[in-house]
Image (cartoon, coloured by chain):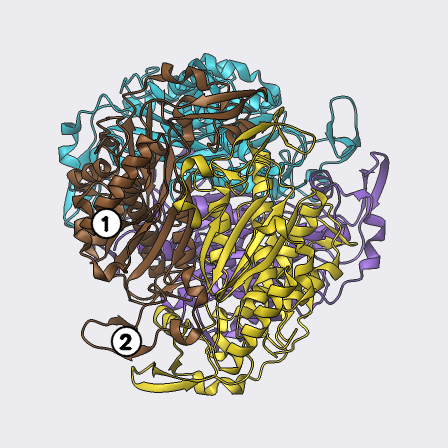
Chain colours: A yellow, B brown, C purple, D cyan
């Protein structure tokens, strides 16, 4: 399907950047969950533009309205429809884009595929439509929280500036204390400087978001095409500007030998995973918490690469819908680096995907 | 779904390493396609173990039998069921694995998830079940060929040995002329040496497969969760031992600036993509042929990282299903590096995914 | 899936009778279709309560708002989100229903399934949620109209009062000229009298809606589980209060012999179906336009049985959520017969289902 | 999807009447179920032709082979692939059908849809392909049996000969003791006579199969498009020759008033349904065990109408693929009435559908 993801916990989204509203439908929300609206709004606020000097200044309230599926503050098990109105539209700002095909945007591909497109602000391909994912992710997190599962993402790289160590060496709660969402304050400051510098240059830069899921029980994930890392990869790669996904040792691990990368099983201690009576843990976690596509009870870890934003505040050559040469210079509100605001979106997609598979896992036995 | 992939061209697989047979059902095969059985068998042979000194010696004929959906040599549009018998089973060889949980295999996770498992040769988690993907991929290739689309993968890295240039610098047809499937003969020789050395050491090593799709028209791919690179990523990550996926500039591209990575559009020449009357090309192809999740008519390029095989021919510590400490030493037939045999599987999954979306793209207009 | 129907043209719905809004998402709307909002609203008005003395007096404006997927009056191929606000709620009216389980409603089954429910006006099980189907159906009709396909339903039976002849004997355009939507004016008057009499008695009555699709080309429908009549049946049976579905000769035809029911093929005349060069027609249409699950180019005909509405304006014995005996007497606004207002819903579900399969049919060949 | 049915317990089928084999894949079989192969084969034998004078004489052994998903006699939770070889093919018998379009068969519609078809014995549209459904149904029954759920179908009508009472007035175990599968011995004899008479006349006749599910807990079924009766209807209508579906009072109930058809709830006794602490039963079961699309703990009852078989042993006018007039007279092995052999297929589809939704119901709460 096109605009729906998931099997039993599903999200269907709709909306364009400059239409009336963006929104979606969450189907399969378990019944009986307290719906903390403030938490959902807080998650949305984490994604909101205009949070700092290094993000776009489009300052919208982005108030979510839940339209159904909640009764007296509790989920009923029926679908939750929701919308966020587009209020700060300035459609006229985009008249010059009507026939222009911006480099490395989706203008050309939408034009070719559909024969027409809403050119205002990228239309359906705008990053604004990720709002719906954050709402659904917040709902999923409310369920995961009750199961003792936490999903935490952070910026691990901006341009060439990369955190040296893995997540266990940082206090991840510190990630939200700076504008780039990097848990290392010193590195965060360097990253901010780099982004500001790039911005001043009218340019943009890429980066990497890393995500850790703790508390996931073993046994989640569905071979063969529902392998947990494959569906996580699908979900992450569907985020705007994503160019790569890896879990566990990922790409770097191809240089290792099996004797280095294998995770040796150890008998259980009190903190170990418990599944079907077998209690064990692993000496290392090169596998990233997933073996054979199924969670093994260790922390689940993965990273997502994001390209530099395609919108530059400098002139670029391009062509228009007639195929004629022209030039394009963007103005106004644009992120020089998508990564800080991608952090809550990565978490949202992880929560959605994991909850779907936690529920699926309930169906393998009677 | 668990064992089905795709929307309108779908593959459902079944089978365990040491059961009666592995097989699958291809649904949505377009009608009227000549079914070249020799080609399908030849594709299977590319995946077969025992092709050279550096792959496992399990030497099975792996004859595919198409059971339906083909009449007088032509596809009828009805589902194509197929099987490959497991003939060289040696089930007894695996008795010692019944209660053993091999490190970094799926033994533990299957045991936890299902409460029991077929322990022989990895059962459902064996690489042998990728046979079904190769058969389906061969069927998809027969259709793509008629559309002028070619899918070609090759080994671009083994351990630290990586090809220096991108695919345009090599004659990809040369990839099949050596055991590692690397298009550069000199590098291929080095890779073979490394794999042999690792094997002699009872160890294993990882690597990267790169894939190029040529001839794909613009307009293929379905935002928002059906983005072409997201479904390709899903398909690739579902292959055994895959740890990462990237397209276009991928992970390396996060260090670039937007001004470097953007692909400038150029007016059409005779070789350019043609879509809805707009004829254009791009000066560079950092996007990997996909923009906003939709093909733009340029070559589609992506890479898949594979971990070192978990089965080592040396002793490892582990635990058994009672949670007691024990050791495990593998014997017999095992690949020291999965990458050479992963090449045809990557191609197969790419062909399956692309055909599905080529057919989906026919439904966006009446 | 639960709240989604379709394969490539899909509808996902949400909403409860007395929540903020009901609505849905149409995904897969072909691009380039002019969106006639007045037509969509007119279709909604056909479903609206309070149209006559024999329908419920709940008089809501039921204004639909399209939130996305339409640009400058034309569909863009992206999902169309829409809502209809619930304005005339009177939630307090339902306080007495909080712990009451109304006979033959969904109160008990929702309570058991989910552990809680929105008791106001039936919540998710209210007929009000069919609004979303009518909106999606109107969108589908806009596409079908361009393909020369018309969907027309009418009331063929109320209680024991049944039309004597089949659809070819009536002017179906006359169905909208009376409150029961029966194309025979004399029978319509009798049906109205019966419904009024039943209403005066505090009781309700069932009926049958018959639907005819003209202009459908041959070749639509997907064996084996996507047989056109099976997916139409699924769609119809999902309408509130539906108890049965039949197509062609249906249940009555079980008494016939094959020699009576077979439809003899005839060579083509100018009005005949044309498919793959074969032009033919049938002497009779006992098959209801579908053979082997695929349309044959003749009119598609089917009927849907609706039970008497469960809400009676008289006292009934029942139990409450504690399992204690109590009684229930409904008051206020309720239809004595669901059939007249079911007519546009039957049309809507037929249009949705048919368009989905017309689009699917485009994928069987390259 | 085309050849797959279900959500978490799914069946994908393949095969043509005169290809190598028919078969399928059951995905989502719960792990840990003992697989009683004799029971599965016995179910297949119930469907087999040649069981009596009134069924077709095509006498095939129809041996099912399970290829995967079962280890040491127990289901592993991985997909179960299976095949039944076509052994008694006589393909040459069908040469005269190559260009002939048999009346009221799927010959024309397949020809139009796909541009070609396997004309031998109806190819994919043959009733022989229901074999796969019976195998999957038998697997589902093995699970249902452990949950205390029984599915029992019987012939309730042949031509005009209809059982007078509902299922509670008969000993349904008697249905298997006669060739027509009617639980009333006297009526069975009359039905047999009628079928023999029709057969002698070279003609065929329709009939009705009624099905009863006992032991289903309340809470099964998924509003809004997954209503239990809607998915049962879909499943039943997908059986060859099915023309109608009704549940509870069905079509006859449209003549009733609400005060007659409503099922009054009663406080629980020891045999009552138990759900979320509410124990109750109903005074009557006009609802057929389903309210609002969800099971209410009472017996689930429905009926399926089957048309007279289209193959007559007498001459009929028709046209060929060139659109020219010709005649057709069938010879050989054909059922004069499909209903007796449809009984096990109705049961199979009911079991498949119910198990899917029993498993789905596990996902509505955490």
Identity of the residue drawn at 79% across and 57% down: C332
Nearest to the observer: residue A299 or residue C97: A299
Identity of the residue drawn at 33% across and 60% down: B362
Residue B312 picture quarter: top left
Category of crowding for the residue at label 2, using alpha-carbon neighbours closer than 10 angstroms: few (below 14), some (14–19), many (at least 20): many
Nearest to the observer: residue D253 or residue A243: A243
**Residue on which the image places disc 1:** B187
Above or below, A122 against B92 in this view is below
Category of crowding for the residue at label 1, using alpha-carbon neighbours closer than 10 angstroms: few (below 14), some (14–19), many (at least 20): some
Q: Position of residue C34 (x, y in %)?
A: 44, 74
Pointer 1 and pointer 2: residues touching (CB < 8 Å)? no
Nearest to the observer: residue D321 or residue A358: A358
User: Subunit of mark 1?
Assistant: B
Above or below, A158 against C232 in this view is below
**Residue on which the image places disc 2:** B280
Residue B217 picture quarter: bottom left
Above or below, D69 against B264 in this view is above
Q: Position of residue C51 (x, y in %)?
A: 66, 66
Q: Position of residue D109 (x, y in %)?
A: 28, 47
Disc 1 or 2, which lies upstream in sequence? 1
Above or below, B115 against A74 in this view is above
Q: Position of residue A107 (x, y in %)?
A: 40, 74
User: Is residue B74 something that shows in the picture?
Assistant: yes
Q: Separation of disc 1 and disc 2 at Cα?
A: 36 Å
């Amino acid at each position: 399907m096109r605009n729906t993801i998931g099997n039993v916990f599903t999200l269907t989204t709709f909306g364009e950047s400059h239409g009336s509203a963006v929104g979606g439908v969450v189907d399969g929300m378990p019944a009986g969950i307290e719906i903390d609206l403030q938490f959902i709004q807080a998650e949305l606020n984490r994604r909101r533009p205009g949070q700092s000097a290094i993000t776009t200044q489009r300052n919208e309230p982005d108030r979510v309205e839940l339209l159904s599926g909640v009764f007296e503050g509790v989920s009923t098990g029926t679908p939750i429809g929701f919308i966020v109105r587009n209020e700060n539209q300035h459609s006229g700002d985009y008249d010059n884009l009507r026939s222009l095909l911006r480099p490395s945007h989706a203008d050309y591909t939408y034009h070719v595929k559909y024969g027409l497109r809403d050119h205002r602000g990228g239309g359906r391909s705008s990053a604004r439509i990720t709002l719906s994912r954050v709402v659904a992710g917040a709902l999923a997190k409310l369920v995961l929280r009750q199961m003792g599962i936490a999903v935490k993402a952070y910026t691990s790289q901006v341009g060439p500036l990369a955190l040296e160590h893995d997540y266990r060496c940082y206090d991840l709660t510190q990630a939200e204390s700076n504008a780039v969402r990097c848990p290392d304050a010193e590195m965060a400051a360097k990253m901010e400087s780099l982004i500001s510098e790039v911005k001043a240059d009218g340019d943009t830069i890429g980066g990497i978001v890393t995500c850790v899921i703790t508390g996931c029980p073993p046994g989640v994930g569905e071979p063969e095409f529902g392998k947990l890392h494959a569906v996580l990869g699908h979900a992450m790669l569907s985020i705007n500007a994503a160019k790569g996904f890896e879990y566990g040792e990922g790409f770097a691990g191809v240089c290792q030998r099996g004797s280095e990368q294998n995770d040796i099983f150890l008998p259980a201690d009190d903190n170990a995973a418990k599944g079907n009576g077998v209690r064990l843990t692993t000496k290392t976690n090169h596998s990233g918490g997933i073996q054979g596509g199924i969670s093994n009870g260790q922390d689940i870890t993965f990273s997502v690469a994001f390209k530099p934003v395609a919108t530059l505040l400098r002139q670029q050559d391009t062509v228009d819908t007639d195929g004629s040469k022209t030039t394009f210079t963007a103005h106004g509100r644009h992120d020089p680096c998508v990564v800080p605001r991608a952090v809550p979106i990565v978490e949202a997609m992880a929560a959605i995907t994991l909850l779907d598979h936690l529920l699926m896992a309930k169906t393998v036995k009677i």
